[in-house]
Amino acid sequence: MNSQQESKRDSKGLIPAYGGELKELIIKDKELKLQLLSQVSYEHECSDRNACDIELLMVGGFSPLEGFMDKEEYKSVIKSHRDTKGLLFGLPIVFDTNNAQIKEGETILLTYKKQKLAILKVSSKWEPDKAEEANFCYGTNSLDHPAVKMIFNERGRYYIGGKVFGLELPNRDFPCKTPKEVRDLLPANFDVVAFQCRNPIHRAHYELFTNALQSENVSSNSVVLVHPTCGPTQQDDIPGKVRYLTYKKLEEEISNKKIKWAFLPYSMHMAGPREALQHMIIRRNYGCTHFIIGRDMAGCKSSSTGEDFYGPYDAQNFANECAEELLMKTVPSKNLVYTIEKGYITAEEAKEKKYQIMKLSGTEFRKKLRNGDSIPEWFAFKSVVDVLRKS
């Protein structure tokens, strides 16, 4: 914890939300709710991705936003990863529709699986240049990139910006604590190290995030927040509900006061550097002071060539450039390997001492999982394997 961070702690001894205030948008005044509902011109059923964005807006995960970005904010963010006030933002937060009838000044009721989530006051509507968005945000126009494919093939023709008035949070298979609820769990004046993942947690992950607490830039008063995303990701990823079940099983199994658990209703974009920044902003809003970032974080491969869209350290380098301004620190993920002689140690130490390294690729793991073959416990927790095999 540096002196700048110490001076910026709030009254509870936690890092303040980005922009200085946690923007919680759920309306508690019943009369205001009725008034807003009476003004509704259209109802719009949300996609899974829309619902994640709305939830994060309502709970303050996207603070300092108070709604979906308008055209000027959108253009500023895609071109400079900053809003019109100069605040950092990795990716634009926009609502999409194919409804050509919606006009600026109108009011939309946002629903999800027949649940009334929120009301959107339309302040801006435009037809985006999606090729420009793809190039700036993802560095490519190729439909082989999962997010580029998403914005061209899944998102509607129009984007809508405007203030959001929350009604209620989505009913989910994976209940997610709000930033306020997570902050209430965190000890005052501690460093809080965020661990982000979108896959089941295996032994190497566990070793990585527990080892992170020993990093040079993390104080002895520290905890790790294991905060996986449970929303939509790449098409071939394990479904969010199944991932959540593996995380819950580990949370019950691992008893360690230095590990806190929560789940994030976020839809991955696999945007590499831009997404690393987005994750850091979100985690600051959840009370985190540090963020673990590894090689090729939020990266992806071309669906046709198999080549990486980003360099192995692009996300890490970009996050480091933004960290000081966010009052956060990055914690590089160590390259840990399992050795017969010493268990998990760094690859550098294993090479230096010529220890025997055990390896199991993701492809081999999935094959063993499908075939019911034995999976070594140095690689995966038995409880996690059991959940995956039952799913």
Image (cartoon, grey):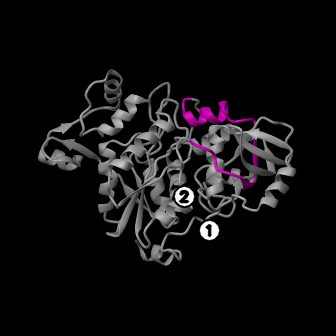
Please tell me whether residue 100 belongs to the stretch shown in magenta: no
The label shown at residue 289 is none
Q: Which residue is mark 2?
A: 281
Say left or right for 181 vs 214.
Answer: right
- Spatial CA distance of label 2 from label 1 is 13 Å
Q: Quadrant of the C terminus?
A: top left
Q: Secondary structure at mark 1?
A: loop
Quadrant housing residue 61: bottom right
Task: Where is residue 50? Give x, y as percent.
Answer: 66, 42
Where is residue 148 drawn, in percent x and y? 60, 35
> Is there any visible trace of residue 98 in the rendered image?
yes
Q: Residue at x 70, y 50 (%)?
A: 74
Tag on residue 21?
Answer: 1
Residue at the image point whose x is 31% and y is 69% from the top: 220
Between circles 2 and 1, the one closer to the viewer is 1
| Residue nearest the viewer, comparing 370 with 342 | 370
The part of the chain drawn in magenta is: 144-172
**Which residue is depicted at the point 45% across and 39% down?**
243
Query: In the picture provided, is 131 more to the left or to the right than 323?
Result: right
Q: Secondary structure at mark 2?
A: helix
Residue 138: quarter of image? top right
Tell me what residue is drawn at x 41 percent, y 44 percent: 247
Q: Position of residue 263 (x, y in %)?
A: 49, 49
- Amino acid type, callout 2: Ile
Q: Residues within 10 Å of mark 1 (few under 14, many from 20)?
A: few
Q: Quadrant of the N terminus?
A: bottom left
